[in-house]
């Protein structure tokens, strides 16, 4: 899985390069800006992405209890903590680089309408979460928010960082025992509340 994710990332970057879209233009290499302001903006983008990701994931998790589903992640303390990293790498490579950045860059270069970008980004995002069944539709708002943040700020690294952090933390929690999972969830909720308060007061 990580090998496929790496190959997919490389192929995407190569296609973009052949269309004249550099790493700087894609938002992987940040443009020069005042350090304090630039760093603060990146953290704000990552913060909004984290909140959107977690909120949609929580909605999907609750909805799968009532809607038809095929399969979904379950808690298992037998899962190795190192086994979660390949899944996070694959998710970041597929969703953030391909579905968000590449779609936005190529369709912008082709002068396609905005609605087309959001439609193309939304569909695959739902598709990669079909293990949730119909509840995968809850990830659609996350796809739209993530693409909106990217199109507005042109920065990919904060989105990648946010997505990877949420995925690694969420998958790591699934490796814990029921008691530790509950404690970890409480800590996660407290951190999310603190993050939301910081973003609101900025």
Image (cartoon, helix red, strand yellow):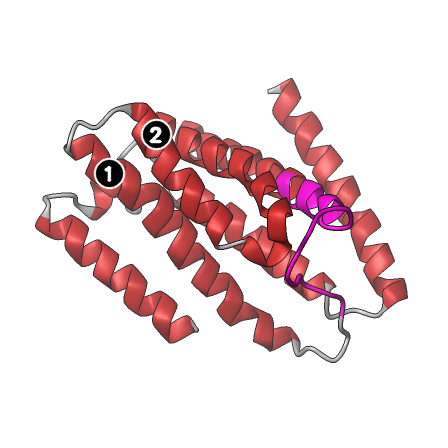
Based on the picture, tell me whether residue 124 belongs to the magenta stretch: no
Which secondary structure dominates the residues rendered in magenta?
loop
SS at badge 1:
helix
- Which residue bears the numbered disc 2? 151
**Would you say 27 lies left or right of 181 here?**
left
Up the image or down, 51 lies above or below 164; here it is above
Q: Residues within 10 Å of mark 2 (few under 14, many from 20)?
A: some
Distance from the alpha carbon under mark 2 to that under mark 1: 9 Å
Residue at 77% over, 75% down: 77
Using the rendered image of the protein, determine whether residue 30 is visible from the camera's viewpoint. Answer: no
Up the image or down, 186 lies above or below 4; here it is above
Query: How many numbered discs?
Result: 2
- Give residue 6's position: percent from left, percent from top: 33, 67
Q: Residues within 10 Å of mark 1 (few under 14, many from 20)?
A: many
Extreme-right residue of the structure: 179
- Give residue 71's position: percent from left, percent from top: 65, 63
- Which residue bears the numbered disc 1? 105
SS at badge 2:
helix
First to last magenta residue range: 56-75
């Amino acid at each position: 899985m990580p090998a496929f994710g790496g190959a997919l990332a490389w192929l995407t970057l190569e296609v973009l390069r052949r269309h004249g879209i550099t790493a700087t233009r894609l938002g992987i290499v940040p443009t020069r800006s005042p350090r304090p302001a630039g760093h603060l903006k990146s953290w704000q983008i990552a913060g909004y992405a984290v909140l959107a990701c977690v909120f949609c994931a929580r909605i999907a998790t609750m909805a799968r209890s009532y809607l038809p589903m095929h399969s979904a992640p379950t808690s298992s303390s037998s899962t190795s903590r190192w086994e979660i990293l390949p899944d996070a790498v694959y998710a970041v490579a597929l969703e953030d680089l391909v579905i968000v950045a590449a779609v936005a860059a190529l369709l912008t270069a082709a002068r396609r309408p905005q609605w087309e970008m959001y439609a193309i980004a939304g569909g695959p995002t739902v598709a990669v979460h079909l293990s949730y069944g119909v509840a995968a539709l809850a990830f659609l708002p996350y796809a739209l928010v993530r693409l909106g943040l990217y199109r507005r700020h042109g920065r990919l690294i904060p989105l990648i960082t946010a997505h990877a952090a949420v995925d690694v933390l969420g998958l790591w929690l699934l490796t814990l025992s029921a008691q530790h999972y509950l404690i970890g969830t409480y800590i996660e909720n407290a951190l999310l509340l603190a993050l939301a308060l910081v973003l609101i007061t900025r």
